[in-house]
């Protein structure tokens, strides 16, 4: 599908008021999105495991205005309190999606949102938050329209979520989601995420992710700034090429179930992401000493235990510890015994692969 396929069709129903609610998950990228072009289009394809426990639940109550207003009309509540400082971000999102949802200025919206994970845990809520909100607005579009296939609904929801936050387009549907044009993946697109369409070995069907909260503080450098530093980055072109190649490799790994090769790709992607940060201008480091302690402990334990535990990182100091279901007891014991001490206030989150967003 191309961009103009997401232009709105005629609305045939008149909906005066109502309420919709969606719960949408976060995701953890195995191949990282880092670097974007205009309009939230990625510089390289990325792929992620959808998470199950880290979610945002968003309820949107809407009321039709007497006449279309000049500006967006909405209030935002976060975890039971009005949240003025989130409003500018939502306004930018609404401005970006309005060309595809022209009814937005016809309504007043009360947006109430909450996260399942602790506030300021250093876990990015933009993926779950923006996807949940995109789904709520899509639901209203569906109510206004004559008929809409499920496939179109999910694609457009992903397309809209992308305009809020790139990684959010990987949080709509599926356990493994790919975003970004990739020659060897039929149906892949820069515009939206797709459910990974090829064979996935049993080894990857029930993967676990324990998120170690090393540093719960506010990120020193936002993802948006980080992405922008990939413009004129001396290693950018090589990096974008590498992501394509890693995705080629990952396709055969997913099919064969080769955990050793999986680990190589996933850990290399995490370190490459941080290497890009360290070699941009200005340069920055998001890992903390405890991030490195954990990585070294994981490497040592993997060697001794012959398990297939590995790590990945997002744009922060927290460590995602990934492991297959059949090793979960042994690895989780190791995490409790040896890694939790490196977390701020010993905090961590147990998560695993989930299947995407749900209407509540
Ligand atoms: C390191 O999706 O948060 O987590 O599009 O500016 O909102 P924006 O960026 P965002 O970037 C996520 C970057 C990452 C890698 C990934 O999730 O692929």
Image: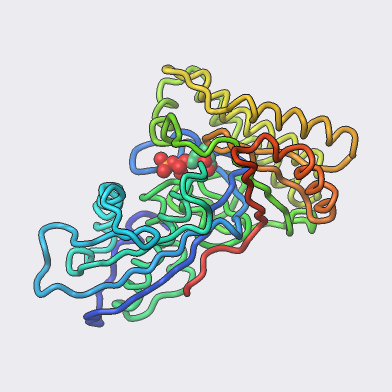
Residue at 27% in and 55% down: 94
Q: How many marks?
A: 0
Residue 325 position, x and y percent, is 79, 56
* Residue 150 appears in view: yes
* Res 294 → quadrant: top right
Specify whether 233 is left or right of 273: left
Q: Quadrant of the N terminus?
A: bottom left
Residue at 79% in and 41% down: 337
Residue 132 position, x and y percent, is 43, 61
* Residue 44 appears in view: no
Establish if 318 lies above or below 285: below
Establish if 168 lies above or below 227: below
Residue at 51% in and 70% down: 358
Residue at 71% in and 45% down: 322
Specify whether 261 is left or right of 106: right
Establish if 46 lies above or below 10: above
Residue 113 position, x and y percent, is 39, 61
Q: Nearer the viewer, residue 44 or 203?
A: 203
Residue sticking out furthest to the front = 345
* Res 135 → quadrant: bottom left
Residue 83 position, x and y percent, is 30, 54
* Res 228 → quadrant: top left
Q: Nearer the viewer, residue 166 or 128?
A: 128
Coloration mode: rainbow
């Amino acid at each position: 599908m191309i961009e103009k396929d997401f232009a709105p069709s005629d609305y045939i129903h008149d909906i005066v008021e109502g309420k919709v609610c969606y719960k949408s998950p976060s995701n953890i990228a195995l191949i990282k999105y880092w670097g974007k072009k205009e309009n939230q289009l990625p510089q390289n394809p990325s792929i992620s495991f959808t998470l199950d426990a880290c979610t945002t639940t968003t309820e949107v109550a809407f009321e039709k205005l007497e006449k279309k207003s000049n500006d967006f009309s909405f209030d935002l509540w976060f975890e039971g309190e009005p949240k003025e400082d989130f409003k500018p971000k939502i306004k930018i999102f609404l401005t970006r999606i309005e060309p595809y949802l022209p009814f937005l200025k016809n309504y007043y919206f009360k947006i109430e949102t909450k996260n399942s994970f602790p506030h300021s845990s250093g876990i990015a809520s933009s993926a779950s938050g923006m996807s949940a909100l995109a789904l709520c607005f899509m639901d209203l579009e569906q109510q206004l329209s004559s008929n809409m296939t499920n496939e179109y609904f999910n694609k457009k929801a992903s397309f809209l979520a992308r305009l809020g936050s790139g990684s959010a387009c990987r949080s709509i549907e599926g356990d493994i989601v790919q975003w970004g044009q990739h020659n060897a993946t039929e149906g892949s697109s820069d515009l939206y995420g797709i459910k990974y369409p090829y064979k996935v070995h049993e080894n990857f069907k029930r993967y676990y992710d324990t998120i170690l909260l090393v540093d719960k503080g506010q990120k020193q450098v936002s993802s948006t700034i980080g992405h922008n530093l990939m413009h004129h980055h001396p290693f950018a072109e090589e990096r974008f090429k590498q992501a394509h190649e890693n995705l080629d490799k990952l396709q055969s790994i997913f099919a064969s179930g080769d955990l050793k090769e999986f680990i190589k790709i996933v850990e290399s992607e995490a370190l490459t992401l941080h290497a890009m940060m360290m070699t941009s201008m200005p340069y920055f480091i998001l890992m903390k000493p405890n991030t490195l302690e954990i990585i070294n402990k994981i490497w040592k334990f993997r060697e001794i235990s012959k398990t297939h535990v590995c790590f990945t990182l997002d744009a922060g100091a927290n460590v995602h510890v990934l492991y297959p279901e059949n090793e979960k007891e042994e690895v989780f014991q190791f995490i409790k015994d040896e890694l939790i001490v490196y977390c701020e206030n010993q905090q961590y989150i147990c998560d695993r692969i989930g299947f995407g967003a749900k209407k509540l």
